[in-house]
């Protein structure tokens, strides 16, 4: 079902080195899509539609892998934290609403941008392992332990794997906006 020609994450990551744009999640997303050949852009559009509807638990890992062959995951950070991140040289996982320490990014959709908040965007390098974040079909927040496989859906949010303690600038993350 989710079968693209085999491309490496590294090839597509490098193809987006020139996607540095002004702060706008839509502009960033469109820039990523513009750099694709017609077949990949068409496939990404199909994935976008599926991700919006929600991808069932059993297909989520395959979708993450296939979409990642087309575009890298994108992390958005409030601009007010950028100088702190820049001086430290890395981003550490923070507790989410469930208490789980994680770094979340989006894959196969426009990056998260709250109204009236400037953000800085980064793309995750190919070596950074990610896994799908699941939400219930009705999108009402529950802890992962409260979800069952029939109820769990993937909506394009990925979590950096537990074994990645820090995301280092220039190695694990590349800034794609100012």
Image: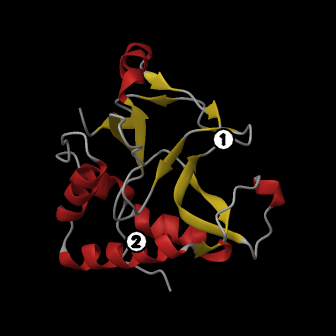
Residue labelled with disc 2: 48
Q: Earlier in the sequence, mark 2 or mark 1?
A: 2
Mark 2, residues whose alpha carbon is within 10 Å: few (<14), some, or many (≥20)?
Answer: some
- Left or right: 45 with respect to 27? right
* Residue at x 24% of width, y 40% of height: 23
In-front residue for pair 93/2: 93
Residue 53 screen position, x and y as percent: 52, 75
Residue 81 screen position, x and y as percent: 42, 22
Determine the image quadrant of residue 115: top left
Q: Which mark is residue 162?
A: 1
Mark 2 element type = helix
- Left or right: 80 with respect to 177? right
Front tag of 2 and 1 = 2
- Please identify the residue farthest to the top as the structure is shown: 87
The quadrant of the rendering that contains the C terminus is top left
Q: How much space separates mark 2 and mark 1, taking CA atoms?
A: 26 Å
In-front residue for pair 130/137: 137
Determine the image quadrant of residue 93: top right
- Left or right: 106 with respect to 121? right
- Please identify the residue farthest to the bottom as the structure is shown: 1
Residue 103 screen position, x and y as percent: 56, 39
* Residue at x 61% of width, y 45% of height: 161
Mark 1 element type = loop
Residue 160 screen position, x and y as percent: 56, 44
User: Residue 20: in sight, yes or no?
Assistant: yes
Position of 45 relative to 136 (above/below): below
């Amino acid at each position: 079902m989710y079968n693209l020609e085999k491309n490496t994450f590294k090839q597509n990551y490098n193809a987006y080195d020139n996607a540095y744009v002004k702060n706008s999640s839509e502009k960033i997303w469109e820039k990523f899509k513009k750099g694709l050949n017609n077949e990949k852009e068409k496939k990404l559009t199909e994935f976008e539609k599926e991700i919006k509807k929600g991808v069932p638990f059993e297909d989520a890992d395959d979708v993450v892998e296939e979409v990642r062959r087309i575009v890298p995951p994108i992390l958005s950070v409030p601009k007010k934290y950028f100088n702190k991140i820049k001086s430290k040289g890395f981003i550490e996982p923070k507790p989410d609403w469930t208490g789980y320490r994680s770094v979340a990014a989006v894959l196969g959709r426009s990056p998260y941008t709250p109204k009236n908040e400037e953000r800085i965007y980064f793309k995750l390098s190919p070596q950074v392992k990610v896994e799908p974040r699941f939400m219930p079909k009705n999108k009402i927040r529950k802890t992962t332990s409260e979800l069952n496989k029939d109820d769990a859906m993937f909506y394009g949010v990925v979590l950096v794997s537990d074994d990645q303690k820090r995301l280092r600038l220039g190695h694990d993350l590349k800034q794609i906006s100012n």
